[in-house]
């Protein structure tokens, strides 16, 4: 969840540090103003903090308003560190496989991508999708910055000299937490645009920590604004679940979209982040398992599949066709985790070796 290089960055932290922190505060999809069919005036409100079960040390973000969407859908509004974050939810009758791209955009689902592999993956994900109400947002601690560790990623990335990519998706099986005898062990698996050798980064995925606790998150970082991660509370996560992760940036509206779905149980959630241009670069795509804290739990093996990226022109391609770079996680000349290379053009396996 950290940028791959740079002076400082925000990370998910352990409760002992959190306790002293103060909280401040595809490719063709359009993120323009959502379609509101028969919309009434927005109703300001504040989420009841007791109704949202945040992870220990995380803080509830109050909802500032809700707008109705067509056919019973809703659009909840939040302000996070001065930025607008909107969470759409589709009505209970919504059928994504039968919906138009305009309807998919209204309710925050990825559009049907171009390309047979990407379309097949999208169709499989949408078959398991089910309507999931907004369960709220929890914010990690703001103002906590750590020295960037250039070796805290393990996975596959690709780079470009221009803003070639504006979307990507990937699937992985959620690993089981095993501290391997190491204290403060935690692990995050995510996809992202940017971050490899540069600061702008938008990312989403899952995170696990002692407890054990598992949850989905989204985060956006740049050199000036070290935003905390935010939980996608609507997505329930358990070991062995098949997780679908998707990130998209729309240059026409300067909005970033974060979408995570548990394909095993169908729960899902979308974030729309406004004014996100300073957090976007299309020069790198990342499929990463990360050590965000002091040690790495034994995740044994994390299989990644359907690793694909969308170009700005609307086309989708397999990661294996983008000359991907193998990124190895190391500490004190010890390999902690390492992918075994591309198994197919859209899949690879990441292997754990040590916890330090």
Image: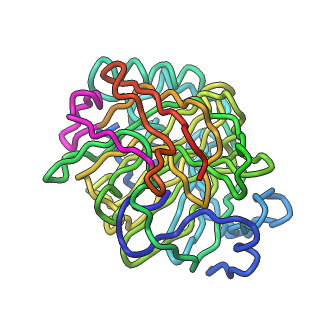
Quarter holding residue 3: bottom left
Residue at screen point 44% across, 48% down: 329
Examine the rendered structure and indicate whether residue 278 appears above or below residue 316: below
Which residue lies most toward the right here? 50
Q: How many labels does the image show?
A: 0
Farthest left residue in view:
161
Residue 50 is situated, as x and y percent measured from the top left of the image, at: 86, 64
The relative height of residue 226 versus residue 158 in the rendered view (above or below) is below
Residue 14 shows up from this direction: yes
Q: Is residue 250 magenta?
A: no
Residue interval drawn in magenta = 310-329
* Position of residue 64 in the picture relative to residue 122 (left or right): right
- Judge whether 193 appears above or below 302 on screen: below
Tell me what residue is drawn at x 79 percent, y 58 percent: 52
In the rendered image, residue 328 lying in the magenta stretch gets the answer yes
Side of 345 where 126 appears, left or right = right
Front-lying residue, 14 or 252: 14
Residue 76 image offset from top left, x and y in percent: 62, 58
Residue at the spot x=59%, y=76% of the render?
A: 142
Q: Quick check: can you spot residue 33?
A: no
Q: Residue 306, how many percent across, how many down? A: 41, 26
Q: What is the quadrant of residue 7 in the picture?
A: bottom left
Residue 147 vs residue 346: left or right? Answer: right
Q: Position of residue 267 (x, y in %)?
A: 66, 35
Pick whichever, 112 or 279, lies toward us. 279
160 lies above or below 310: below
């Amino acid at each position: 969840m950290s940028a791959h290089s740079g002076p400082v960055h925000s990370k998910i932290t352990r409760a002992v540090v959190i306790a002293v922190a103060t909280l401040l505060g595809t490719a063709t999809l359009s993120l323009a103003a959502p379609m509101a069919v028969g919309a009434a005036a927005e109703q300001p409100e504040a989420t009841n903090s007791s109704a949202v079960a945040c992870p220990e040390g995380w803080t509830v973000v109050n909802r500032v308003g809700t707008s109705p969407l067509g056919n019973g859908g809703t659009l909840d509004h939040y302000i996070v560190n001065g930025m607008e974050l909107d969470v759409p939810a589709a009505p209970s009758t919504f059928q994504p496989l039968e919906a138009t791209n305009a309807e998919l955009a209204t309710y925050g689902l990825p559009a049907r991508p171009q390309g047979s592999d990407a379309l097949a993956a999208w169709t499989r994900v949408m078959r398991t999708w089910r309507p999931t109400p907004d369960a709220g947002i929890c914010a990690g601690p703001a103002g906590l910055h750590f020295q960037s560790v250039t070796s805290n990623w393990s996975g596959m990335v690709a780079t470009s000299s221009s803003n070639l990519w504006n979307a990507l998706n990937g699937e992985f099986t959620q690993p089981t937490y095993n501290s391997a005898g190491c204290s403060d062990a935690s692990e995050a698996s995510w996809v992202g645009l940017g971050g490899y050798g540069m600061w702008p980064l938008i990312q989403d995925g899952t995170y696990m920590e002692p407890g054990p606790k598992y949850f989905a998150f989204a985060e956006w970082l740049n050199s000036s604004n070290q935003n905390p991660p935010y939980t996608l509370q609507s997505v329930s996560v358990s070991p062995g679940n098949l997780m679908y992760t998707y990130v998209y940036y729309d240059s026409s509206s300067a909005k970033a979209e974060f979408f995570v779905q548990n394909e095993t149980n169908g729960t899902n959630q979308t974030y729309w982040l406004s004014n996100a241009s300073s957090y976007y670069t299309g020069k790198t795509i990342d499929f990463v398992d990360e050590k965000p804290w002091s040690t790495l739990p034994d995740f044994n093996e994390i299989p990644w599949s359907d690793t694909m990226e969308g170009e700005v022109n609307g086309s989708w391609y397999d990661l294996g066709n983008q000359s991907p770079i193998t990124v190895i996680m190391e500490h004190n000349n010890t390999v902690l985790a390492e992918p075994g290379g591309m198994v197919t053009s859209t899949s690879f396996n990441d292997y754990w070796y040590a916890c330090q």
